[in-house]
Amino acid sequence: MNMDGLDPTILGPALLAGILVLSTHVPMGIKVLERGIVFIDLAIAQVAGVGIIGADMLGLPMHGGSVQIVATATALSGALLLAWLEKHYARSLEALIGILFVLAASIGIILLSKNPHGGEYLKDLLVGQILWVSPHDLIPAALIYAVILAVWFIFRERITGVLFYAMFAITVTASVQLVGVYLVFASLIIPALTVMRMRRFRLLSGYGLGIAGYAIGLSVSAIFDLPTGAIIVCAIAGSSLLFSRLLNILHNDL
C-alpha cells in the first residue's frame, strides 16, 4: 500500500480524461442500447486501433495530428461500412458488428506480428495508458467532444444512419487514444445499462456512476500499484452494481 501514489498531478489529468470520455459516451451508450447494437463501440474502437497501428508503421509521431487523421479516417471507413450494413442487412447487424470487431482485431495482431514490442503495444491499445495522459493531450479531445455534444443535444432526433455512425467513429477514435479499448466499452455500456430503466435523472445518474468508477479506480490503482485501466473497469462495474441494487430497494422510484 502506497498513499504517496495519490499524486494529483498524475491522477488529476487522468480523472479529467475519464470525465471527458464519459461526457459523450454515456448519452451515446443509452442510444446504442436503445438501438440494440451493443458491440458497435468495440468494433469501431478496434478499427480505429488498426489505423493507429498503421500510422505507427508509417513512422508517424504517435501524439501528432497525423495519427489522429489516419485513425479517424480508418474509423470512419468502418462506420460507413456499418451504416451500409444496417441499411441492407439490418436483421444480422449485431452479428456483422461482431465479425468486424474480430477481423479488425486479427488485422491488428498481424500488423504487430513483426514488431518486437508488439505485445506491449497491443496491451496499451486495449487497456490504455490513462496515467500518462497530460493536460496537453486533453485539449484536442475536449474540442472534439464539445462539437459532438453540441450536435448531439441540438439535433438528437435527426441523428440517424450515416451521421450517427460517423459521429460515433470520431468520438471513439479520440477516446481510444486517451483511455484504451476496454475503458471505451466500459464507459459507453456499463453506466448506460444501469440507468436504462430509470424514469428520471437517467443521464445525470449515468455520469455520476462513471465518474465514481474512474475516481475509485484511479485511487485504488495508485494506492495498491495495480493496472489502472483494468481496475477502473472493475470499479465502474462495481459502482453500477451497487447502484442497481439501490434501485431495486427503491423499486425504481427515481
Image (cartoon, grey):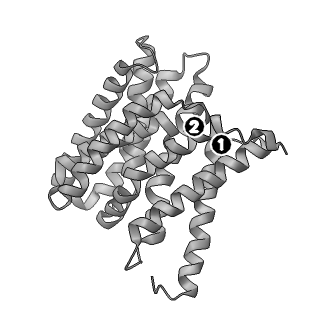
Q: Is residue 186 above or below residue 169?
A: below
Q: Residues within 10 Å of mark 1 (few under 14, many from 20)?
A: many
Q: Residue 228 shows which numbered tag?
A: 1
- Tell me which amino acid carries mark 1: Thr
Quadrant in which the C terminus appears: bottom left
Q: Is residue 192 left or right of residue 37?
A: right
Residue 80, how many percent across, how many down? 21, 41
Residue 232, how many percent across, how many down? 61, 50
Q: Is residue 128 left or right of residue 55?
A: right
Residue 97, how many percent across, how many down? 34, 49
Q: Secondary structure at mark 1?
A: helix
- Tell me which amino acid carries mark 2: Ile
Q: Is residue 161 left or right of residue 175?
A: left
Q: Identify the residue shown where x is 59% and y is 78%.
A: 245
Farthest residue toward the right?
1
Q: Identify the residue shown where x is 58% and y is 87%.
A: 249
Q: Identify the residue shown where x is 36% and y is 21%.
A: 65
Q: Is residue 45 above or below residue 25?
A: above
Quadrant housing residue 121: top right
Q: Which residue is mark 2?
A: 130
Callout 2–callout 1 Cβ contact below 8 Å: yes
